[in-house]
Image (tube, rainbow, N blue to C red):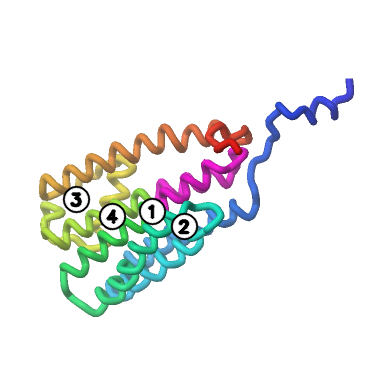
Amino acid sequence: MDDSAVDDRPDRPRPLLSTAPELHQWTSVLVVLIATTIVTSVAPSRIGQALIGLTLAALVVSVVQRRELVPLWLRVANVVALAPAVALSFTDAASDSSTITGAREVATAVVLVTAMVAILLRVARHPVVTGATVMAVVDVYVLIGLAFAATYGSVEAFTGDMFASGPASPFDTTYFSVITLTTVGFGDLVPGSDLARSIAMVQALLGQVFLVVVVARVVALMGQPNARRPQP
């Protein structure tokens, strides 16, 4: 029997591991997110806040505002959240108002959530689970941490008791979010209110469910047809 005939059977999954353009895109998103997190943690707060606004705008343009891939309702929701998030990022850089800071953090969290939903919807359209698919869900995992960091920042801005040890810096909330997401639990920062504890519990559960169920499943299906792809 001719081996080439066997390899060309339509029911045989092809070992497609990546689609270069998409893989580069999702890798770039991950690099930008990590780089921005590091820079904003060590840069003066005013510069960091403005940088966050610019990063959000770039993230939205590259991930969410793709007319052929993302539903209209999600793109509209994203823009509605993005406009105040970017505006408040620059306003907050010139102001000491905790109310403005809290509003910026809430808007930032909403933008990140819409970006996560957009990525998951795009991944569902992949005909084959590839390296790009894996990188995209890793991006979502990182975005979960950043969205909760923004949520913790809003708690600190509006209540002032995010941590029992005292006032929290942007680095504190990001650090605590990553530690909670990965369930490391160093214990050097402890939530200071029932609201903060509740949010931390939700994040710990969500992070583990996403990592064990979604990321692990996608990695296991590498190179196989995507069963979740909507049929024409």
Q: Is residue 209 left or right of residue 186?
A: right
In the rendered view, would you say 165 is above or below 82?
A: above
Q: CA distance from mark 4 to mark 3?
A: 13 Å
Q: Position of residue 199 (x, y in %)?
A: 21, 45
Which residue does the numbered mark 2 point to in the structure image?
A: 64
Placement of the C terminus among the 4 image quadrants: top right
* Left or right, 55 with reference to 192: right
Query: First in sequence: mark 2 or mark 4?
Result: 2
| Front position among marks 1 and 4 | 1
Note whether residue 42 is visible: no
Q: Are marks 2 and 4 in contact (CB under 8 Å)?
A: no
Mark before the other along the chain sequence, 1 or 4: 1
The residue that mark 1 highlights is 114
Amino acid type at circle 1 is Thr
Q: CA distance from mark 2 to mark 4?
A: 21 Å
Residue drawn where x is 62% and y is 32% of the image: 224
Instruction: Provide the residue designation for mark 4.
Output: 149
Residue type, label 2: Val
Is label 3 or label 1 in front? 1
Cα separation, mark 3 vs mark 1, equals: 28 Å
Instruction: Work out whether mark 3 precedes mark 1 in sequence or the reverse, and give the earlier one.
Output: 1
Part of the protein shown in magenta: 114-142
- Mark identifier at residue 189: 3
- Near-viewer residue (135 or 58): 58
| Earlier-in-chain disc, 4 versus 3 | 4
Mark 2 → mark 1, Cα distance in angstroms: 8 Å
From the viewer's side, name the closer residue of 184 and 214. 214
Q: Would residue 195 be counted in the magenta stretch?
A: no
Q: What's the residue at 29%, 74% (across, down)?
A: 44
